[in-house]
Amino acid sequence: MSAVDIASHPATQALVNRHKLRWWEPIPWILAIGFFFLFPRHLGFGNEMLVMVLFALSLDLVLGYAGIVTLGHAAFFGIGAYTVGMLARHGIWTEPLSGLLIAAAVAAVFGLLSGFVLLRTTGLTLLMLTLCIMLLLEEVANLAQEWTGGYDGLDNVPIDPIFGRFEFNPLYPTTQYIYILCILFIGFLIVRTIVYSPFGESLTGIRENTLRMHAVGAPVRKRLVISYAISAAIAGVAGALWAQSNAYVNMSTLSLDRAATVLIILVLGGYGRLYGAFVGAVAYMVLSHYLAKLYPTAWQLGLGLMLMVIALFARNGIIGIFESLVARWRGKPAS
């Protein structure tokens, strides 16, 4: 095949165009900005939703793209939250932006070290080991009461104003919302760049066929460990944002509930798809909020039924349903 033919081949064009912004990609950001103006009394809810989007994005990088199955991703979320909380509460460091960088560094180092050991295993063994790491950290947080506050956690965590000017106000969290939205945007750009880079493509190749990637000489384990550490850093930032916006840290940041919630969000939205984290987080938070109002004692039943329907009939999540409808409308087979 000549050079000209290769350049015009559809596969070549797809690789060349993979970085380009699609027309619909600004929509989630427009909606997030619109939420700020339309629902000023619900910005606390919005803050929680944005943090969970960033947390789900971090999990999507390892689960959706690298194929690393983990049940303990809340460990990194909790490490980020406790790093910021302990530094601020004990008067060591209260500046918010550099606090995020410190939390990301601590979570990344823990992700690198734990990934180096854990990613020697796969399947059910890996699943159980990640769960054990998270439970061990939860117990450490409980025992180290002098630093972590134990079961009660740390409250009244002092955070300096952003740039020395914009203060955090728990009653009117406008600063928190804009702050978290900006950090989410930066985090999303990082994940998007990684996913569409040759490194990200190799992660997808490892997920699809690990043996073939070994056969072509790709450093499979090294790339899995690096992606695990990057994902840990992003999850640590999400946890740090949660601690800063709520001004407290407790053991729920390291709990199995939080790990399960972010997994459900990805399944609902669709893993291996950048915007699945956005759709899943919004669907989960809104649905759980209204179900809790309608059926306070059994709201999880409705959520579980919806999750069963998604898992049985739409394995690519809500995003996958839209992709199928668009493909059918264009007369193309669904991916």
Image (tube, rainbow, N blue to C red):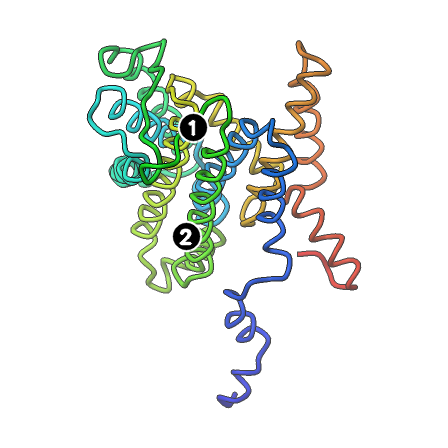
Would you name the residue on which mark 2 appears?
Answer: 190
Q: In front here: 270 or 53? A: 53
* The quadrant where residue 194 appears: bottom left
Q: Nearer the viewer, mark 1 or mark 2?
A: 1
| Residue type at tag 2 | Ile
Q: Nearer the viewer, residue 334 or 157?
A: 157
The residue sitting at 64% across, 18% down in the picture is 300
Count of marks, rendered view: 2
Determine the secondary structure under disc 1.
helix
Residue 112 in percent (x, y) is at 27, 41
Q: Provide residue 242's location: percent of width, then percent of height.
A: 42, 29
* Residue closest to the eye, 104 or 96: 96
Q: Considering only order in the chain, which callout, 2 or 1, is on the residue closer to the N terminus?
A: 2
Query: Would residue 332 be found to the left or right of residue 124 on screen?
Result: right
| Vertical relation: 13 (above or below) 285 | below
- The residue that label 1 is drawn on is 245
Q: Quadrant of residue 99?
A: top left
Q: Nearer the viewer, residue 130 or 238?
A: 238
Q: Residue at x 39, y 35 (%)?
A: 166
As drawn, 214 above or below 300: below
Mark 2: few, some, or many residues within 10 Å (few <14, many ≥20)?
A: few
Secondary structure state at the residue bearing disc 2: helix
The percent position of residue 294, horizontal first and vertical second, equals 73, 16
Which disc is residue 207 wearing?
none
Q: From mark 1 to mark 2, how far is it between C-alphas?
A: 22 Å
